[in-house]
Every structure is written in structure tokens, then in C-alpha cells.
Image (spheres, grey):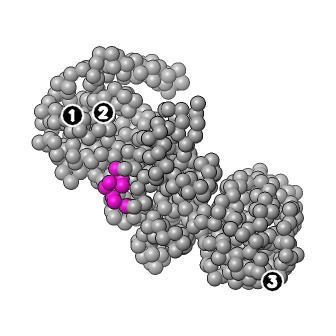
Amino acid sequence: MSAEFATAGVVGIGTMGSGIAEVLARSGVSVIGVEKDADSAARAQAAIEASTARAVAGEKLTESERADLLGRITIGTDLTAVAEVDLVIEAVPEDLELKQQIFTELGQITRPEAVLATNTSSLSVTEISVSTANPRRVLGLHFFNPAPVQAFVEVVRTVVTDQSAVDAVKNLAEKLGKTPVVCGDKAGFIANALLFGYLNHAVQMYESRYATREDIDAAMMYGCGYPMGPLALLDLIGLDSAYEILNSMYKQDRKRVHAPAPILKQMITAGLLGRKTGKGFYTYAGQESHEVVADEQTPSKDRLPQLRHEISRVGVIGTGTMATGIVEVFAKAGYDVVFVARSEEKAAGVQKSIAKSLEKAVQRGKLTEEARDATLAKVTGTTKLDDLASVDLVVEAVVEDIDVKRALFENLDEICRPGAILATTTSSLPVIELAATTKRPGDVVGMHFFNPATIMKLVEVVHTVATSPEVTETTQALCAKLGKVAVTCGDRAGFIVNALLFPYLNDAVKMLEAHYATADDIDLAMKEGCRLPMGPFALLDVVGLDVSLAIERTLFSEFRESGFAPAPLLEHLVTAGYLGRKTGRGFRDYS
């Protein structure tokens, strides 16, 4: 096999192929592109010229470098033009028969030592490789779109791929300025296997009308820091492309998580493919436009949530990190807050923590001294639940134990005035079970803040079958007054964020458990390939493996979905006391 690649062929110069050709030429490789006809070849040439012109405008290339780059790329329609190259990368549409046909021809016309690579994102590289007489020289080289920008590359070896071919392609990827990860030939490889299960789950959530498209997307953006919500991302990818990737993975692994949601096929049949057609889950200003415009599903700006209950005095129960943050959030927004602690010492601790937080804000210029003093004056600590008798809203933020919370809500039902709203910050327990312990289930709502509450913008407002619409609307409006983004959903395990996040994290653990890839490679794939703020194992160690396991058990118990069953590896780590950063060891060692 070739140890160095001075020349390369790219078969299929569409969006991905043209990007790959540009990346290769930038690094000094002479590229021969092949398209199906003259019109396609001309469009490909124009696309590369436009892309490099933008690079010059953005001062990422000089005019001289652009001219050299373009001079290294030749695009035609004759496949035999790649006969003498060192490497051929196929980037045609995700059609197994088409790819097999191309590889059969490549196997006949290329030099025996040339490496043949497919850019498939989901098809079996092995099935493609056996179309040639020598499958040992075939592998996957999966670039991410747009190839000139995305740094991550998956190098996919089959059970017969020659190691020298893998090493040579990995070295080339590094020369191109990419970060390669070598993995086996498994449906979806690393990134897509994890990403598209999550996207498909979001589509199912939307299809069941559990939450609106806006709330699903906002939940993942503001709750997890994702650059895009799942439905907006699907519109960008293209619903037809997403369907093909999911369908291909499902045919290979038969995992229900990859079985395309029925609504995807319906939307594709109706021509709703996303940005490329101007309409998908959202409506856009035109074809290929990124500008979202209002449609029949867009919430009316004339009908914003209103405070149907007067809220001026707020009670918070708890002294942990979450409770302390919630007290500060309400006090900053101008509400009088009384918080309940188990002891005078713990109450003093809360006051001290809030004062320290506010002082940091003053030092950073985010808060005036007057605002600091006014906020602190709004906060009162107590050790008596009875002091909540006159509040308009109680937010419970105690330990995540259903029995403890039930007992607390029984007490609140007796103590709080009629009409007061009783809210729980639970992240996974059934809100209805707390409501049922009271004689006022219509006044009970979920108000799930994210940690740290002073920073995270998202609040999930969870209504039960008994919650009155006025209470739900008041809670939504209240969140806006707190400067938060409220999303609304029903009382179902995990609500929106955890229901989408933790099955994905669980799938990552199962991938590690199967020795398919290392924790470092999986984290790298999701950070670099999917632009997520943290990889799954880094996130699990921050959240806490015990907390993660409890949430996954709750999801599995409610949905009875086999794919939600917690990975045995996660259970073993928790049993061993390896809980993540808080114990110094989880999926990684922090000692």
C-alpha cells in the first residue's frame, strides 16, 4: 500500500466531495475529481471556486494560495482518469448498489497498491469492499460536513483491511489538519450511531405531541448547551439524508433506536426535506435558506403567557446547591424569598453562599453594590415550614426521594394558603405522585431548574393531568420574569432534556462496554464531529454516575424500552463507588 499520497481521486464532487477535494488540494495533494456528467462537473468546479473565494475573503487563504489550490484540482467525467492515483475517495450518494458498482470498476482500473476509501456515513464498508478483487486495500474515510471546516475524521477498518492502509490514511488525515479516530465497521461508526439515535428520539417526541418543536429544540440548546436543537439540525442535514442513514443503521443492527420515526417518511413523501426545500420541521425564507419564518405552528407573539396568579412572595425549601441558586435567582428578580433549612447553621450557610456569589458579580461588574444589598435584603432564612403560610409560590428543592417529597407536599398542603402554587424541582420523579398527596392537585406543577440555577437559562415547566392551565401559564410567565427560558411538557419520566440526553449517554457506555472505541475516542467524536460542548463520558463524570444511573433506571421503568436498560458497566462502576469527579474516579481517574 502507498505510504504517502501525492495524488488522489475523488469520485462524486457534490457538497461533500467538493469539500474533500478542496481539503486535499490545500495540503498539496493533486486531485482528480470525477462526476457523472459535464453539468455536474461544472457545478462542482464552481462550488470549489466559490468556497475558496470565501476563504480568501475571510483571510484564510491568499489569492496566490487559492490559485495554487485550484491548479491542483482537475474535474472530469471519466473514471479511468484516476487509474494512476495513490488514493481514491468515493463520495457519491448513500446507495449501496451504486457504491458497489463504483468500487468494482475502481478495483479493475486502479493500481494494485492504491488505497480505495469510501466516505459513507452509515453503510457497511465491508459490503462495499467485497465488490473489489482485493478488499484488503479498502477502508472507510468518513469526513464530516463541511469538510474544509470540520476537524474530525473517522477511519473505518474492516476485518480484512490491511493495517498499512489504515496507517497511511490516518497519517494523511493528520497531514490535512484533521483529528482521525480509527474504528471498526459498525453501523453508524461512532458519531452517527450516537447522534442519530438521539435525533430519532427527538422526532418521536415531536410526533407524539409531547412538546412543541420550539420547546424540544430550546430544551437541548439551553439545557445542554448544544449549538442547535435536534429538529433544526435534522432540517440542516436533510430529512431524506437522515432517513437513509437511520434506515441503513437499522438494517445492520436492528436496534429500535435507529428505526426511523414514521413521520420522517411522511414528511419526505410530502417533499418536506428541510432547508434544501425551504420547509421541514420549520419553514424557511426559501430553498437552502437558514432564515426561519413564521408558519402555522409558530407560537403567536400576541399570546405570551401571563401571570394568572399574583406572585410577590416566594418560598424555597432546601439548602443544597440547587436550592441556594434558586433563592438567589428569585431575589435578584425582585421577589421576597423565605427559604427553609433544617438548622440555623445550614440557613447561615445559604446566606453566606448567596452573599459570596453576589460579591463575585459585583467584582466582575455584573452587579452594582446597591443591587447586591437590595438582593440580600430580599432573602430570609427560617427553620420552620409554618413560615411559608403566606407565600404565593413554594419551590421544593430537597433530596430526590419520592417518600421525602410526598411527606413534604402533605405538609405544604396543610400550611400554605389556598391558591398558592406548589412547585417541585424534581428532574425525574412523577410530579403527579406529589400532587396526589394534596387536596389541591391543580395547584401543583413541576419547575425543573438546571444546575447551576443562577447561570443555566432553561426551566422545564411540567404539567400533570391535574394541573390547572392557569397554574401552568403563570409558571411560564414567572420564568420569563426571572430571565429564564421556559419549555413546557407533560409529566413523563425525564421530561424533555433527560429523556433525550440519558439514552444517548447510555448508548455511549454500551459502545465503550463492547470495546468498539475508547472513552477518549468517543468523547472526541461527539465534541469534534457533532460540535457538542462535552463528550458523553466527560459529562457523565460531571453529572455523577450514581445520579445518571438513577435517571436511566427511572426512564427504563417508565418506558419499558429495552434500549433504555442501564448499561451493566455503568451499574458496576456505581457499585464500586466510582461515581465520577465527586469521588475522584469514574470513567476517568481524577486523583
Considering the numbered disc 1 on the image, is that residue within a helix, a strand or a loop?
A: helix
Are the residues at dot 2 and dot 1 in contact (C-beta closer than 8 Å)? Answer: yes
Q: Quadrant of residue 259?
A: bottom left
* Residue 117 vs residue 417, the one in the foreground: 117
From the image, which quarter does the C terminus lie in?
top right
Cα separation, mark 2 vs mark 3, equals: 69 Å
Q: Nearer the viewer, mark 1 or mark 3?
A: 3
Residue 329 appears anywhere in the view: no
Residue marked by disc 2? 398
Considering the numbered disc 3 on the image, is that residue within a helix, a strand or a loop?
A: helix
The rendered magenta stretch, by its main secondary structure, is classed as helix
Cα separation, mark 2 vs mark 1, equals: 9 Å
Say the numbered circle drawn on residue 408: 1
Which region shows up in magenta? 554-561
Residue for point 31% across, 22% down: 378
Residue marked by disc 3? 108
Seen in the image, is 74 located left or right of residue 408? right
- Of the two numbered discs 2 and 3 on the same chain, state the one appearing first in sequence: 3
Residue for point 40% across, 18% down: 352
Whole-percent x and y of residue 381?
28, 20
Cα separation, mark 1 vs mark 3, equals: 75 Å
The amino acid at mark 1 is Leu
The amino acid at mark 2 is Val
Q: Is residue 223 above or below residue 366?
A: below
Q: Residues within 10 Å of mark 3 (few under 14, many from 20)?
A: some
Seen in the image, is 552 located left or right of residue 533? left
